[in-house]
Amino acid sequence: IPTVLKNTFDTNSRFSVQNVDTEANNLVVRFINGDAAAGAIGAEVAKDEVAALPSNAAKYYDAGTLASLPASFNGSVIIEAKRAGGADGKVVATALELSIGGTGASAFEGVPSTASANTFYMPSALCQAYGSTSSYAVQNTDAAAAASVTVKYFYRPTSDLNAALVSAEETKSIAPGAKASFVGCPTMPDGSIGSAVITST
């Protein structure tokens, strides 16, 4: 799960993990730090182990109430599922981000490491355009090596949608299992609209 928050950015995350295997799965859920101000990026902050989650059952987490997390948390989650004999299990995950002080909400699905990629195409990138700014949470799914991730924006001003596309990019190093946040501003100037390509090495 590329982003999980507790009392951060006016947001708490809730997520659930469902066993979609034909037999019980043992889960290890690791919370990985993504905020340099809170310690080493990529460090495991908390861990929860679930024994023999039955087939089709789900385990629910509310980051806002998890005592194992610090008062505020900005990071990612890695979920590992195994059958009793040690073979890989099968789970799906979905996350919900809820505003603490307002009515904002967003939801997304977890991504299996087998579906991760070195290039992602983002069809929308905004900087203070139409009342919104784009933010991307990018998680390094490599278990051992850091990833150098570049977000390249292709944009034009909202005041002239026929203008030629301009590009700008931002690069960050991401520790194994950790995430980095890429925000459209200030890499793009205010009033920009476009798209982005995310690449990693």
Image (cartoon, rainbow, N blue to C red):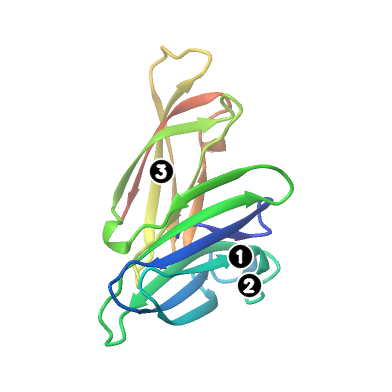
* Label 1 crowd (10 A; few <14 / some 14-19 / many >=20): many
Task: State the count of labels.
Answer: 3
Q: Which residue is the extreme one toward the right?
A: 101
Q: CA distance from mark 1 to mark 3?
A: 28 Å
Residue 198: % across, % down? 36, 45
Q: Residues within 10 Å of mark 3 (few under 14, many from 20)?
A: many
Marks 2 and 1, Cα distance to the nearest angstrom? 8 Å
Left or right, 193 with respect to 92, comes to right
The kind of residue tagged 1 is Ala
Q: Nearer the viewer, residue 89 or 131?
A: 89
Q: How far across and how far down the image is residue 37, in percent?
A: 64, 64
Residue at 36% across, 75% down: 81
Asked whether the beta carbons under mark 2 and mark 1 sit within 8 Å of each other, the answer is yes
Is the residue under label 3 in contact with that under label 1 (CB below 8 Å)? no
Measure the C-alpha gap from mark 3 to mark 2. 30 Å
Label 1 vs 3, first from the N-terminus: 1
- Name the residue nearer the viewer: 69 or 58: 58
Of mark 3 and mark 2, the one earlier in the sequence is: 2
Residue 63: which disc?
1
Q: Quadrant of residue 22?
A: bottom left
Marking on residue 151: 3
Q: Which residue is mark 2?
A: 69
The amino acid beneath tag 2 is: Leu
Q: Residue at x 38, y 22 (%)?
A: 165
Report the side of 72 relative to 109 (left or right).
right
Q: Nearer the viewer, residue 24 or 130?
A: 24
First along the sequence among labels 2 and 1: 1
Name the secondary structure under disc 1: helix
Under circle 2, the secondary element is loop
Residue 34 seen in the current view:
no
Residue type (three-letter) at the residue carrying disc 3: Val
